[in-house]
Amino acid sequence: MVKQRSHWASFFVVAILFTGIQDLARAGSIAEAPGEFIEKLADKAVAALTIDDISRVERVQRFRKLLNDHFDVKTIGRFVLGRYWRKASEEERAEFLMLFEDLIVDTYVDRFAKYSGENLSVTKTEAARNDDSIVFSSINRPGGGPPVGVAWRLRLRNGSYLIIDVMVEGVSMGQTQRSEFASVIRRNGGEVKGLIAKLRDRN
């Protein structure tokens, strides 16, 4: 049950990211409270998702820009590669980050159609180390059923918030990806190039 709910919630997590690029350029200012930042993303996403005639190409472009503007992709990439980041060459790191970004886009861009009227409410915000904030939220389904808890870890970068992890029902999406990548690397002789080759094939 938890696995099914976490899988469903990932659709909404991505849906929250789908919003107007110009509006988002103003979001994430340090003047905003972390909870307000997440709530604004949710509200704008709900409005944007009523558009039916957007092409997949445009969705990919918007999502990729949104990902780079509002997620710290490099920090996430270093985390999910774990101890193997230090073992990788500069060329391997650069290619991994590029392929990792492509993986995120390819995995989630077609899931926007799954949104069906869910709404998000922020329940609390906590300060964490490294100037991080954790925003706890509850996602409620219009048809009823138990709410799904989603927590967002934000980090300040040059006066703006960037998302560095999303936790669905207490499960870190970053930690989950880190475990999966480590397993692939171990099966390929402990070499990052083995993971890179798999990502190339998948993408």
Image (spheres, helix red, strand yellow):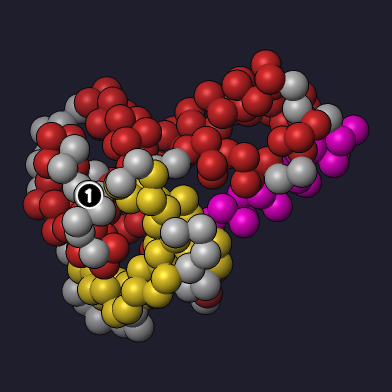
**Residue at left 61%, top 20%?**
95
Q: Position of residue 179 (x, y in %)?
A: 70, 52
Question: Compared to 68, does 177 lie above or below?
Answer: below
Q: Position of residue 149 (x, y in %)?
A: 39, 74
Question: Compared to 143, does 189 lie above or below?
Answer: above
**Residue at left 75%, top 27%?**
88
Question: Is 195 placed left or right of 104 in the picture?
Answer: right
Q: Position of residue 77 (x, y in %)?
A: 57, 39
Question: Compared to 49, does 126 lie above or below?
Answer: below
Q: Tell me which corner region of the image, top left, top right, bottom left or bottom right, holds residue 202.
A: top right
**Residue at left 62%, top 56%?**
176
What's the magenta region?
173-190
In the depicted view, which residue is nearer to us: 129 or 200? Answer: 129
Question: Is 190 placed left or right of 82 in the picture?
Answer: right
Q: Is residue 177 magenta?
A: yes
In the depicted view, which residue is nearer to us: 141 or 74? Answer: 74
Q: Is residue 116 magenta?
A: no
Q: Main secondary structure of the magenta part?
A: helix
Q: Quadrant of the C terminus?
A: top right
The residue identified by callout 1 is: 29
